[in-house]
Image (spheres, rainbow, N blue to C red):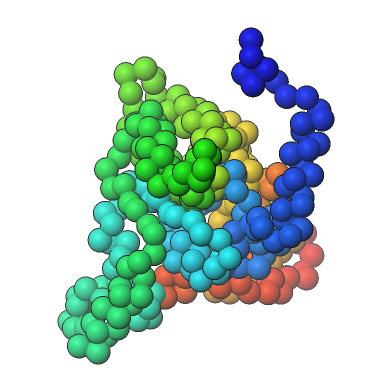
Amino acid sequence: MEESKLPWITKREAYKNALNYIKLRKDGLIKSIKTPWQRFNDSAVDGFEWHSMIVIGGRPAVGKTMIKDQIIREAFNLNKHTYFRVLEFQFEMVAKVGAIREYSSVLSKSYKQVCSADNYKISDDDFKKCIEYSKEKVNDPIEIVENPCTVNEFEQFIEAWFEYHAKVVGNDKQYVPGIITVDHSLLFKKTNFENDRMDTLYHLGEALTRLKRKYPVIFIILSQLNRNVDSVERTGDGKHGNYILDSDIFGSDALLQHADIVVAFNRPGAKNIRIYGPERWIIDDDRVLVAHFLKVRNGDTRMSFFRAEFEKMSIVETPPPPRDVKIKN
């Protein structure tokens, strides 16, 4: 067998590759992708590293899509040092809806107001602001896949996308780095060879690992939580069960072993939880979001607090809330 095709590399090569990566980062030639939130960036390696996979989990209506959209919406301004493209698999909603949600953020108005509903009519000035925003953002290199597909089709689409945008420099092919989002992991089409959703998720995890090893990519995958997170035993005030665990991510065995970062968001006030967890955080705002960093392969696990600004389609970092110092009998 030719040496270049051997299924192993030497430790010498591993050291060489690692030193090359360290040098490129030292010289600022490789940088992580920064998110809009310092706590996200600090938990990882100053942001999301290339060749990685991030899973964002949460209950319905907690704001997972909003969080993903904010990452993409602000990514180009926050990372002007790096040229990259974005490919979004929007299985849950059509691209038009995503664009309207962006306008909602720009205008600080609700989706309904932007759509002139509930006896509200969008003003000509606000409509012009939407047009001007479109002119600014239309050149962002973003492509969208709207129709659900199988995992095999997903892998083929991504390979075709990287090949389509690749550049040839001399005798070398250089792939343009890409951020790829999936909204949601449960919406992939099942093939005849897959018995259930779990089979599909296992195939998805394997495909994501193959792809992230081959291409300069950051995957952002949205996932639901298992239903037992809403059980009576876990929604009472001040219980350890308030906190989200990695086993609460739907298909956790299938996805977590492949993921580099797993963040699960909880919105305690939506379940009338006013004293959150054994640390007894006081939740007096239904918009408080708790981010549980459940797995950070090259960083730190932690719990952080945010506030959802739904009218702006965004979240902001907040200090931890006060604690209830009462001793529970």
- Depicted 40 relative to depicted 13: above or below: below
Which of these two is toward me, 169 or 263?
Answer: 169
Q: Is residue 96 left or right of residue 217?
A: left
Location of residue 276 in the rendering, given as x and y in whole percent from the top left corner: 65, 61
In the figure, residue 323 lies in which quadrant? bottom right
In which quadrant is the N terminus drawn?
top right
In which quadrant is the C terminus drawn?
bottom right
- Depicted 267 relative to depicted 227: above or below: below
Image point (41%, 39%), residue name = 163
From this viewpoint, which residue is outermost toward the top?
1
Which of these two is toward me, 89 or 19?
Answer: 19
Which of these two is toward me, 264 or 213?
Answer: 213
Q: Is residue 282 left or right of residue 159?
A: right
Image point (30%, 40%), residue name = 148
Q: Is residue 210 left or right of residue 98?
A: right
From this viewpoint, which residue is outermost toward the front?
170
Image point (58%, 52%), residue name = 264
In the figure, residue 111 lies in which quadrant? bottom left
Location of residue 92 in the rendering, given as x and y in whole percent from the top left corner: 33, 49
Image point (78%, 70%), residue name = 325
Residue 165 in view of the camera: yes
Location of residue 207 in the rendering, given as x and y in whole percent from the top left corner: 49, 31
Location of residue 117 in the rendering, given as x and y in whole percent from the top left corner: 19, 75
Q: How many marks?
A: 0
Residue 57 in view of the camera: no
